[in-house]
C-alpha cells in the first residue's frame, strides 16, 4: 500500500523524536528539483523503475536493486524518475548514527561519502529488504521500555551496515584507486565539517596539502567544470534554504548567525551571489 508523503519538516521532526523511520514503499519523488541537506542518514533501496539523482552535485542513475546511503550534511537532489519508480526509504537520526559509530562501525564509514550507492544482486536485495522490514517492525513497535527499543534498533542497524559493507567491497576498492574522485569527496567532507567557520577555497586546499591552483584543476576534472568556490557557495545556500524551510519563524539575521556569518549584510550578499536572489525574497516566495 502506497504511503502519503509527509512534509520535509514532519519527516525531520519524526526522525529526531523516534530515531528511525522506515517507509516500505514510496512511489516517485516528492522533493524534486531542489538541493536538500538532510541532518540525518537517509538510505534507499530501489524496488522498481529507475531515477536520476545528484549526491554532492554529482549525478547518478538509480535502478532496481540499487542501494544508496546519504550521510548527514551532504547534498541530495532528485532530478527525474520513471513512472514506476518505487523504493524503500530509511531515515536514521544523527544521534543514533553517532552512537552506532562508537560501538559498531567506527571503521570505513566515510566510504558512503565517496560512493553513495551500490548495486545488489537479487538475493542480496531480498536479504536487505527482509532486514528493513524487520527494522520497520521494531521502529513502529509501541513499547514503554524505550531504552530496550533503542538497543534493539542499534543492533539491527549494525547488522545492516555489515551487510552493505560486505556487498559493496569490490566497488569500494575501485573508488579508492580514483584520485580525482578521492580529492573531490575529501573536499566535500571538509566543507560539511567546516563551512560555518570558513568558506575560502585556499583554506580547504591547505587542509588537504595541495596548491590551490592545482587543487582547483583536479577538482574541476570530477565536478563537470564546477569550481570549488561555486561548490561551497551552492552548499551554503542549500543549508540556508533548509533552515528557512524548516524554521520559517527564524529571521534572516538568525539564519546568518546559525551559518557562521559575521553580519546579516554579508550573508545576504553571499546568498545573492549563489542563488541570484536575496534570502528575504526566498522567504517571501516560500512563505
Image (spheres, rainbow, N blue to C red):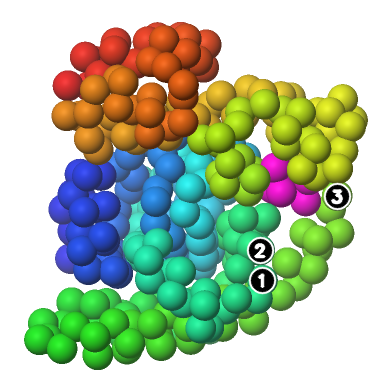
Q: Which mark is residue 179?
A: 3
Taking the image as drawn, is residue 33 in sight?
Answer: no
Magenta portion: prevailing SS class: helix
* Quadrant of image for the N terminus: bottom left
- Compared to residue 204, the image places residue 225 above or below, namely above
Going by the picture, which residue comes out furthest to the front?
262
The Cα–Cα distance between marks 2 and 3, rounded to whole angstroms, is 14 Å
Q: Which element type, helix, strand or loop, lies under badge 3?
A: helix
Q: Which quadrant of the figure has residue 285?
A: top left
Give the crowd class for mark 1: few <14, some 14-19, many >=20 residues within 10 Å: few
Q: Which quadrant of the figure has residue 220?
A: top right
Q: Residue at x 60, y 76 (%)?
A: 106
Q: Would residue 75 be found to the left or right of residue 38 on screen?
A: right
The Cα–Cα distance between marks 3 and 1, rounded to whole angstroms, is 18 Å
Q: Residue at x 71, y 75 (%)?
A: 169
Q: Which element type, helix, strand or loop, lies under badge 2?
A: helix
Q: Which element type, helix, strand or loop, lies under badge 1?
A: loop
- Compared to residue 206, the image places residue 97 above or below, namely below
**Marks 1 and 2: in contact by CB < 8 Å?**
yes
The residue singled out by tag 2 in the image is 111
Q: Position of residue 72 (x, y in %)?
A: 47, 54
Q: Position of residue 177 (x, y in %)?
A: 86, 59
The residue singled out by tag 1 in the image is 108
- Compared to residue 50, the image places residue 108 above or below, namely below
What is the magenta range?
181-187
* Mark nearer the N terminus (3 vs 1): 1
Asked whether 94 or 138 is in front, the reply is: 94
Asked whether 282 or 76 is in front, the reply is: 282
Q: Position of residue 258 (x, y in %)?
A: 38, 34
Asked whether 186 or 225 is in front, the reply is: 186
Q: Which mark is residue 118?
A: none
The Cα–Cα distance between marks 2 and 1, rounded to whole angstroms, is 6 Å
Amino acid at each position: 500500500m502506497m504511503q502519503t508523503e509527509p512534509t520535509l519538516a514532519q519527516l525531520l521532526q519524526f526522525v529526531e523524536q523516534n530515531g528511525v523511520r522506515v517507509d516500505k514503499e514510496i512511489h516517485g519523488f516528492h522533493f524534486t528539483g531542489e538541493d536538500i541537506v538532510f541532518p540525518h542518514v537517509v538510505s534507499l533501496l530501489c524496488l522498481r523503475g529507475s531515477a536520476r539523482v545528484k549526491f554532492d552535485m554529482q549525478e547518478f542513475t538509480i535502478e532496481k536493486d540499487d542501494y544508496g546511503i546519504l550521510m548527514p550534511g551532504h547534498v541530495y537532489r532528485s532530478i527525474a524518475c520513471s513512472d514506476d519508480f518505487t523504493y524503500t526509504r530509511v531515515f536514521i537520526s544523527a544521534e543514533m548514527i553517532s552512537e552506532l559509530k562508537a560501538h559498531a562501525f567506527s571503521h570505513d564509514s566515510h566510504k558512503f561519502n565517496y560512493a553513495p550507492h551500490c548495486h545488489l544482486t537479487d538475493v542480496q536485495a531480498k536479504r536487505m529488504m527482509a532486514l528493513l522490514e524487520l527494522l520497520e517492525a521494531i521502529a513502529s513497535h509501541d513499547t514503554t521500555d524505550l531504552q530496550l527499543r533503542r538497543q534493539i534498533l542499534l543492533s539491527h542497524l549494525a547488522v545492516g551496515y555489515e551487510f552493505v559493507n560486505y556487498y559493496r567491497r569490490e566497488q569500494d576498492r575501485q573508488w579508492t584507486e580514483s584520485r580525482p574522485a578521492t580529492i573531490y569527496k575529501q573536499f566535500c567532507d571538509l566543507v560539511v565539517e567546516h563551512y560555518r567557520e570558513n568558506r575560502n577555497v585556499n583554506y580547504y586546499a591547505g587542509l588537504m596539502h595541495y596548491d590551490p591552483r592545482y587543487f582547483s584543476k583536479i577538482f574541476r576534472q570530477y565536478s563537470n567544470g564546477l569550481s570549488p568556490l561555486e561548490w561551497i557557495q551552492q552548499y551554503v545556500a542549500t543549508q540556508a534554504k533548509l533552515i528557512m524551510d524548516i524554521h520559517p519563524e527564524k529571521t534572516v539575521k538568525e539564519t546568518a548567525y546559525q551559518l557562521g556569518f559575521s553580519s546579516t549584510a554579508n550573508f545576504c550578499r553571499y546568498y545573492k551571489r549563489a542563488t541570484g536572489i536575496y534570502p528575504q525574497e526566498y522567504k517571501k516566495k516560500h512563505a
